[in-house]
């Protein structure tokens, strides 16, 4: 009988290599390449525990010279860092995350949902129970009384683009290519989850040698259907007041310059979503600013007046459309999108295809068409209002507004700066007020996940080391997840955190009281049922994790600290006290809503308070304007 090759050595006659399933996975991942010759999966974030330490952990150690391991502090925030890396790389590269079974895996579920909503690639390798079931129930095993195949990892199913359970070592031969096929598909891009049974991780198998040949993953660019292209071109030629709504798909397609040329050539103003902001620099004359609930007066005015709305790479979320109230009842809607599901939303005329290729084809089809009905002065008026709102305050001792904080950071940074954030008041303020260069904006607002910010800043800096990363985070989000500061210190990953402390959940307090007619309750610390009002020393806290931390006494001090942070190779945390609500009464809000357009947040139909009943009556008036076509 022919003997087997020694452990891990190639059998030249059989053309196989004997490895554990975990070793084979890591070896395979290490040779998956981009068109530019870089690893597509740029390493794996890992916290080891029961269910991945002996299998995946050993494999990562074995291949540590060709496939990096990144050690984090929390499974969710590790995944946030990986997602921010993929977003910073415009979905051209990604990272993986491994977890133990049970709480390690379920900690990643929130991050997987974030990646799913934002259409971003993430590989999750979650430890799972024993495939053999020999020691069941194992530590941390979730048992379903009616289904023996269920584990905690089934929680991933609704938030995965691809889900698989590796219960035999040969399963990775098909599961791994399928996972990366989804992650590199511009239409179906999202998280791939491999629930990897812990006994199978350690089992050996004779894998075909050819499985480990380097492979290049190409990102396809589907061209639009000729019939759809012709119909959409006809709608645009017939329009007098068209407007473009630019989404994240413009950036992921690398269509920024093509969008600029399209808007200039055809005279169509551009409004931005959170994901699409900075596709055009704010200085571009066709960039009218933010769209929707947190939109600019200029962008929302051209959108209201539009007879044709052209969405490009956007899923038309409620913030973008003012909960379907922003566009006029007679306005037609066109949606250019890589996925037919998104392209057909809101009853739009679909144009399915890659944003870059489609805009080029559409421009050629339109020829010399040019719309001239918009008012270019509205953009300049808006920018002057922004400058005034963000100007340096005369009284440095007074608590600044979020707008004044943004203005200070803007003045203290250059074109390399990227402003990033995720939740609270700051996303709306930044979308409204930050004036980026191209690529100078990174917002996670599809899921608006508190706690993304610090980890996301670290992942973004890994993706874009040449850029200055400014992380805006409120005290509420900072309290939810801050521990990856320690990781960034350990790995010498520099970025700047601007921590605005308004002593509670100021954004939701504003929605509660000013948006929905409620009474202040349970959001600001002063409105909570507590024995003692907290006095949290965020400077001491950040410094305890090794970051350079300082408190800015005012706007001038903030500007100076932003400049000083550039010379460090560790994160800098700058804490500044701010007022809780800074939009009402500023002159930036429009008559349609608080500081932009209506946002549909349900208001109680029955109340014993007159204020609440008045808000409900106003709410009924607003929702009556919504376009209900799906």
Image: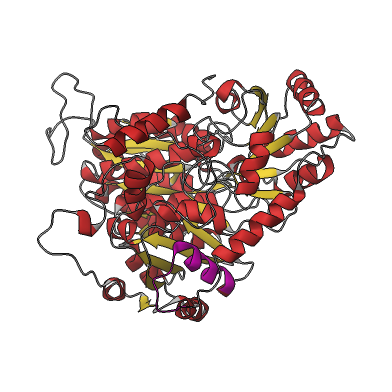
Q: In this view, does 516 lie above or below 74?
A: above
Q: Residue at x 42, y 48 (%)?
A: 96
Q: Residue at x 36, y 74 (%)?
A: 547
Q: In this view, does 538 lie to the left or right of 301?
A: left
Q: Is residue 327 left or right of residue 574?
A: right
Question: Which of the two residues, 237 or 464, is positioned nearer the viewer here?
Answer: 237
Q: Is residue 441 above or below residue 611?
A: below
Residue 602 is at least partly visible in this image? no
Question: Which of the two residues, 233 or 483, is positioned nearer the viewer here?
Answer: 233
Q: How many numbered discs sit on the rendered protein?
A: 0
Magenta residues (range): 395-411
Q: Is residue 150 left or right of residue 592?
A: left
Instruction: Name the quarter where the N terminus is drawn.
Output: top left
Question: Which of the two residues, 569 or 427, is positioned nearer the viewer here?
Answer: 427
Q: Which residue is drawn at 29% across and 47% down?
A: 99
Provide residue 444's location: percent of width, then percent of height.
46, 48
Q: In this view, does 258 lie to the left or right of 173?
A: right
Q: Residue furthest front?
A: 610
Provide residue 150's location: percent of width, then percent of height.
23, 26
Quadrant of the image occupied by residue 219: top right
The colour mode here is secondary structure
Q: Residue at x 36, y 50 (%)?
A: 510
Residue 626 is at least partly visible in this image? yes
Is residue 81 covered in magenta? no
Provide residue 106's location: percent of width, then percent of height.
26, 41
Provide residue 48's location: percent of width, then percent of height.
26, 53
Q: Which residue lies furthest to the left in this view?
A: 531
Quadrant of the image occupied by residue 413: bottom right
């Amino acid at each position: 009988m022919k003997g087997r090759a020694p452990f891990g050595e190639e059998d030249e006659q059989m053309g196989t290599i004997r490895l554990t399933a975990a070793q084979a996975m890591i070896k395979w991942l290490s040779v998956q390449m981009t068109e530019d010759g870089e690893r597509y999966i740029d390493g794996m974030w890992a916290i080891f525990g029961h269910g991945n330490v002996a299998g995946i952990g050993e494999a990562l150690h074995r291949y540590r010279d060709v496939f990096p391991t990144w050690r984090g502090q929390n499974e969710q925030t590790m995944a946030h860092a990986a997602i921010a890396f993929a977003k910073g790389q415009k979905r051209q590269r990604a990272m993986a995350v491994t977890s133990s079974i049970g709480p390690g895996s379920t900690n990643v579920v929130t991050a997987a949902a974030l990646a799913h909503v934002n259409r971003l690639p993430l590989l999750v390798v979650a430890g799972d129970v024993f495939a053999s079931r020999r020691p069941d129930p194992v530590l941390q095993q979730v048992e379903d009384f009616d289904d023996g195949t269920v584990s905690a990892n089934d929680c991933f199913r609704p938030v995965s683009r691809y889900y698989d359970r590796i219960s035999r070592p040969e399963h990775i031969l098909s599961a791994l290519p399928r996972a990366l096929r989804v992650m590199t598909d511009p239409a179906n891009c999202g998280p791939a989850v491999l629930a990897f049974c812990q006994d199978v991780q350690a089992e050996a198998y004779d894998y075909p040698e050819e499985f480990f040949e380097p492979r290049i993953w190409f990102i396809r660019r589907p061209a639009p259907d000729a019939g759809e292209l012709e119909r959409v071109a006809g709608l645009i030629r017939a329009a007098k007041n068209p407007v473009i709504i630019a989404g994240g798909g413009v950036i992921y397609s690398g269509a920024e310059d093509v969008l600029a040329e399209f808007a200039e050539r055809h005279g169509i103003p551009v409004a931005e979503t959170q994901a699409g902001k900075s596709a055009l620099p704010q200085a571009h004359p066709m960039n009218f600013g933010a769209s929707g609930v947190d939109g600019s007066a200029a962008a929302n005015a051209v959108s209201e007046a539009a007879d044709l709305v052209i969405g490009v790479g956007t899923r038309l979320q409620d913030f973008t459309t003012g909960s379907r109230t922003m566009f006029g009842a007679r306005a037609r809607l066109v949606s250019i999108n890589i996925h037919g599901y998104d392209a057909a939303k809101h009853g739009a005329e679909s144009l399915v295809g890659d944003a870059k290729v489609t805009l080029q084809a559409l421009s050629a089809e339109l020829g010399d068409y040019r719309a001239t009905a918009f008012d270019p002065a509205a953009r300049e008026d808006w920018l002057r209002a922004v400058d005034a709102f963000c100007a340096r305050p005369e009284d440095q001792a007074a608590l600044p507004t979020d707008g004044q904080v943004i203005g200070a950071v803007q003045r203290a940074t250059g074109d390399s700066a990227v402003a990033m954030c995720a939740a609270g008041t700051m996303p709306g303020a930044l979308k409204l007020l930050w004036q980026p260069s191209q690529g100078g904006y990174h917002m996670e607002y599809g899921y608006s996940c508190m706690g993304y910010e610090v980890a996301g800043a670290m992942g973004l800096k890994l993706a874009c080391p040449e850029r200055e990363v400014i992380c805006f985070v409120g005290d509420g989000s900072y309290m939810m997840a801050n521990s990856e500061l320690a990781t960034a210190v350990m790995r010498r990953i520099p970025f700047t955190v601007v921590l605005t402390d308004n002593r509670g959940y100021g954004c939701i307090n504003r929605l509660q009281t000013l948006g929905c007619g409620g009474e202040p309750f349970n959001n600001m610390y002063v409105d909570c049922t507590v024995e003692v009002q907290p006095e949290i020393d965020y400077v001491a806290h950040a410094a305890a994790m090794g970051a350079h931390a300082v408190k800015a006494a005012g706007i001038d001090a903030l500007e100076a600290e932003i400049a000083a942070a550039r010379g460090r190779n560790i994160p800098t945390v700058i804490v500044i006290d701010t007022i809780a609500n800074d939009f009402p009464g500023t002159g930036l809000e429009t008559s349609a809503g608080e500081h932009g357009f209506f946002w549909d947040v349900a208001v109680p139909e029955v109340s014993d308070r007159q204020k609440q009943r008045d808000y409900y009556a106003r709410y009924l008036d607003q929702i009556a304007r919504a376009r209900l076509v799906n």
